Image (cartoon, helix red, strand yellow):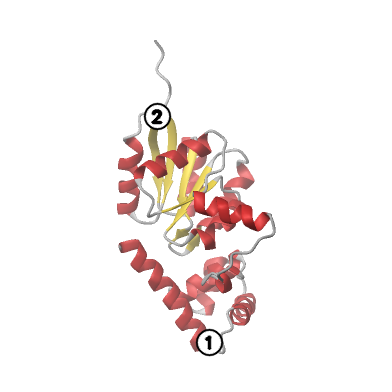
Amino acid sequence: MSVKRKSKVLLVDDHLVVRKGLGLVITDDPGLTVCGEASSASECMFLLSKLMPDVILTDVSLGNTSGLELIKDIRKINANIPILAFSIHDEDLYAERALSAGASGYIMKEADADSLLMAIHKVLDGDVYLSPAMTSRMLRKLSGNKDSAKSPLTEINTLSDRELEVFSLIGHGFSTSKIADQLHLSEKTIETYRAHIKEKLSLDDVASLTRAAVYWVEVGSQSKTA
């Protein structure tokens, strides 16, 4: 009697404790095994070709790197591998961005173990995974209906993926020059992004931009440790 091969999962998260916790949940499933762990986008890209996983589970925030950009980079070299994105941030903000980047699904870190395993198996089967609530919102959006209540994340949602990345780095205390180095862009380009962010978020000056960015990062950090 042949034994069915377990599907290999590559975990990508910059926090060791999170990776270990996810690993315990995944290895408890008889059809899954963790084939490797990566703490950064570059490490993930290296392990991708070496380990040949069946599915990738990645955070959308990888320290100073954007998980969304990682998803786009993976798609450039592998158009078919299922990618399940997850985050502490509300799915209203990141789910559509993740799918647009090339992810096969999106799940919140606060989801229970059964939901996580179901999401992994669903994307492995070639389906798209979103929470029932997010699926409903997206269907209403596609049908042209608007939620009656304005989401508190509406203004943040107006930021492009790159603008959101710059906003996050500002919140982590990066100067314009350091952000430019991190993203391999010119300081003038970063200043342009900063100006666009201020305009989109209705922020008057650099100080208010910095406060808003720091608050955004702090809220995320508190959620991660909750």
Near-viewer residue (142 or 163): 142
Depth check, front residue: 146 or 53:
146
Per the image, the residue denoted by label 2 is 31
Q: Which of the 4 image quarters holds residue 202?
A: bottom right
Residue 35 lies in quadrant: top left
Which quadrant is home to the C terminus?
A: bottom left
Seen in the picture, residue 52 relative to 41 is either above or below; the reply is above
**Measured along the vertical axis of the image, is residue 2 above or below residue 161?**
above
40 relative to 114, above or below: below
How far across and how far down the image is residue 37, in percent? Answer: 39, 45
Q: Are marks 1 and 2 in contact (CB under 8 Å)?
A: no
Residue 173 visible, this orientation? no
**Above or below, 226 relative to 33:** below
Q: Can residue 217 be seen from the camera position used here?
A: yes
How crowded is the residue under tag 1: few (<14 C-alpha within 10 Å), some, or many (20+)? few
- Which residue ends up furthest to the top in the rendered image? 1
**In the image, what residue occupies the spot 40% across and 67% down?**
220
- As drawn, the label of residue 206 is 1
Looking at the image, how many numbered discs can be counted on the residues?
Answer: 2
Residue 216 percent across, percent down from the top left: 45, 73
Residue at screen point 63% across, 41% down? 79
Determine whether the residue tagged by mark 2 lies in a helix, strand or loop: loop
Element at badge 1? helix
Which quadrant holds the N terminus? Answer: top left
Q: Quadrant of residue 195?
A: bottom right
Name the amino acid, label 2.
Answer: Gly
Looking at the image, residue 183 sits to the left or right of residue 211; the answer is: right
Badge 2: residue crowd in 10 Å (few <14, some 14–19, many ≥20): some
The location of residue 34, given as percent across then percent down, is: 38, 37
Q: Nearer the viewer, mark 1 or mark 2?
A: 2
Looking at numbered disc 1 in the image, what kind of residue is underneath it?
A: Val
